Image (spheres, rainbow, N blue to C red):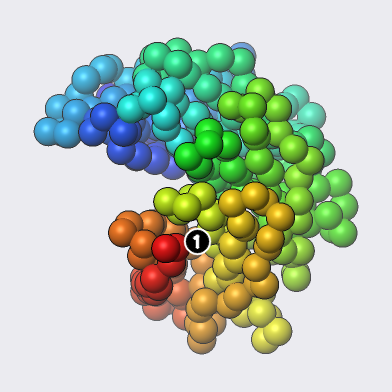
Amino acid sequence: MNEVKDAGRFPIIEATLDGDFLIGWIDRRIDNPKPRQLYLIKIGADGNALTKNYQVGQGLCECCKLGFAFADAGKTVYLVDREVDANKIRNHVLRKSTDGGATFGAPVEISNDGWQVPSCPHSGPSVGRDSRGWLHVVWFTLGRSEQEAGIYYSVSKDDGKTFAPRRLVHANTAPEILYANLAVGSDDTIYLAWSNLDNASRAQIFMRTISTDGQMWSAIQQVSNAKRNASRPALALRNNQLHVAWTETDGEDSRVVLRSAAVGR
């Protein structure tokens, strides 16, 4: 995908609604005047490249994952990432394309968390779009103080022009970097998964849901029971089945765990 050796990192791939695939990554082939570029490439269902890889943004946090959402059979692309400014403030933004990802408009800040940190936290945002066109985003931040640290959620009801004030999903229970993901159900229920410490100071995976109107938030549920630590949850929805996968580590040993449950109607 990337012909420049040792330049690409943290790739993400998502299937568009027209059956193609869009791949994005953080690239450091050009680190001046703004470090860390955002590169994309589109490939077809047969695996053949439909475009060359090309730059669509710059000034990204160097190690935070990206997130994609699509509309209009892939013509509209929403991309979220964490940016870093000259003062090392790291906030998330949304970029929107109306030509299938060929070009993107100016980034829109999702929340001004004011998190100033000298190095990358390795924890980027996740985005999903529901049947009404609402855009849902979840992320982690330490904010301006330890009291603000946690997993947060916001929604845009105007196609990404503005975002509602952030809402706390789960406060950070220790000075740890947390990791979050979301998925949108066929009935527009929002499923959130993230890592946090349990009462035994072990990292575990937690989940909660948000109702279609945004008013009902379920109780927080612990879905892992790792002997040591569980981290980096991933979500997938298909045929009213929710699948949650994560990594568990115990010293030098590690494994991937999957749990599934029936959801929706």
Disc count in the image? 1
Q: Which residue shows up at 70% across the image and 84% down it?
A: 199
Q: Is residue 197 above or below residue 50?
A: below
- Say which of 141 and 59 sits in front: 141
Residue 203 visible to the viewer: no
Q: Report whether 186 appears left or right of 229.
A: left
Position of residue 95 measured from the top left corner of the image (x, y, whole percent): 55, 24
* Residue that mark 1 sits on: 232
Q: Eyeballing the image, is 194 above or below 15?
A: below
Looking at the image, residue 216 sits to the left or right of residue 183; the answer is right
- x then y, percent, for residue 247: 43, 68
Q: Residue at x 55, y 54 (%)?
A: 190
In the image shown, does 206 or 63 lie closer to the viewer?
A: 206
Quadrant location of the N terminus? top left
Residue 72 occupies quadrant: top left
* Residue 149 % position (x, y): 78, 56
In what element is the residue under mark 1? strand
> Residue 265 appears in which quarter of the rendering?
bottom left
Q: Position of residue 71 (x, y in %)?
A: 42, 29
In which quadrant of the rendered view does residue 211 lie? bottom right
Q: Is residue 205 visible?
A: yes
Vertical placement of 22 versus 174: above or below? above
**Residue pictured at 39% horizontal, 39% vertical:** 11
User: Is 91 situated left or right of 51 in this image?
Assistant: right
State the residue in front, 54 or 154: 154
Mark 1 residue crowding within 10 angstroms, few (<14) / some (14–19) / many (20+): some
> Residue lying furthest left in this view?
46
Query: What amino acid is found at the position of numbered circle 1 in the picture?
Result: Arg
202 above or below 159?
below
Q: For the point 34% across and 39% down, which residue is it?
A: 13
